[in-house]
Image (cartoon, rainbow, N blue to C red):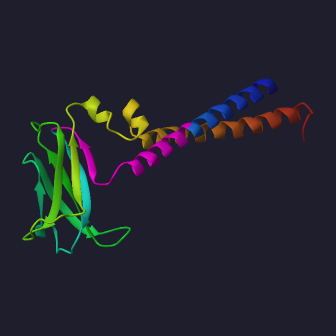
Amino acid sequence: MNLDQASRWRNQAGKAGAFFCILILIGVFDALIAQFRQPLNVLHVLPGTSVEINGSLEEKVRGIEDLTYISSSDLIRLSFETTHPGFWFGGQMWSGRLTIRPHIEPGEYSLTVIPKGKKPQKSRFVFRINVYRDLSSHQQSFKSLIRRYLGIPPWWVAVFFLPLTALMFGMVFYLSQKKEHLMAQGGKAE
């Protein structure tokens, strides 16, 4: 390798590393913007799928055996897994798995979690469940542009390009050292 090749390859690796950094930032910004644009109580699902779900409770309960739910469709089932303290604002939360039956009609449904034995009241914690007919209409519902048009989560873009960025900047470092060594051999540097 001569001095011109080392310089050229170092410049190319630097440009590739900068490009990968931009792609990482695009993935992170897209994920964060989509997260802030998506309400916490709205779920987008397909018939025959199952998703994790969690929510806040308006009053304390001993455990999941004290919880029940009201759904606008019998084809939406919720199985409770645990109750736990809230992370940000305290209070008590529950988590579980929401199962959508395969023969449900596309549309908008609601789900409310209440303590057993309580009468349903107007609750702040009503989930809106949007069921879509097919994968393409479901994909168009995503707030993330990367997920909407490419079909992959935006965090995966950032995670995929992170090692490539580190590799490119490692190559820049190596080629800079190589260039210095070649210049020192030619008497052009110390």
Is residue 153 located in the magenta-colored stretch of the structure?
no
- Asked if residue 29 lies left or right of residue 63, the reply is right
Task: Locate the N terminus by quadrant.
Answer: top right
Q: Position of residue 89 (x, y in %)?
A: 36, 70
- Asked if residue 158 lies left or right of residue 10, the reply is left
Does residue 67 sit above or below 153 in this rendering?
A: below
Instruction: Identify the residue at image location x=21%, y=73%.
Output: 59
Instruction: Identify the residue at image location x=11%, y=39%.
Output: 104
- Quarter of the rendering containing residue 151: top left
Q: Where is residue 168 in the image (x, y as percent from the top left)?
A: 62, 36
Instruction: Identify the residue at image location x=33%, y=72%.
Output: 90
Is 104 or 154 nearer to us in this picture? 104
Task: Locate the C terminus by quadrant.
Answer: top right
Q: Where is residue 135 in the image (x, y as percent from the top left)?
A: 26, 31
- Asked if residue 159 lies left or right of residue 73, the reply is right
In the image, which residues are magenta? 23-47
Does residue 159 sit above or below 84 in this rendering?
A: above
Instruction: Identify the residue at image location x=25%, y=58%.
Output: 54
- Quarter of the rendering containing residue 111: bottom left
Q: Residue furthest front?
A: 122
- Asked if residue 34 lies left or right of residue 97, the reply is right
Does residue 53 sit above or below 87 in this rendering?
A: above
- Quarter of the rendering containing residue 14: top right
Is residue 28 located in the magenta-colored stretch of the structure?
yes
Q: Is the magenta stretch mostly helix, strand or loop?
A: helix
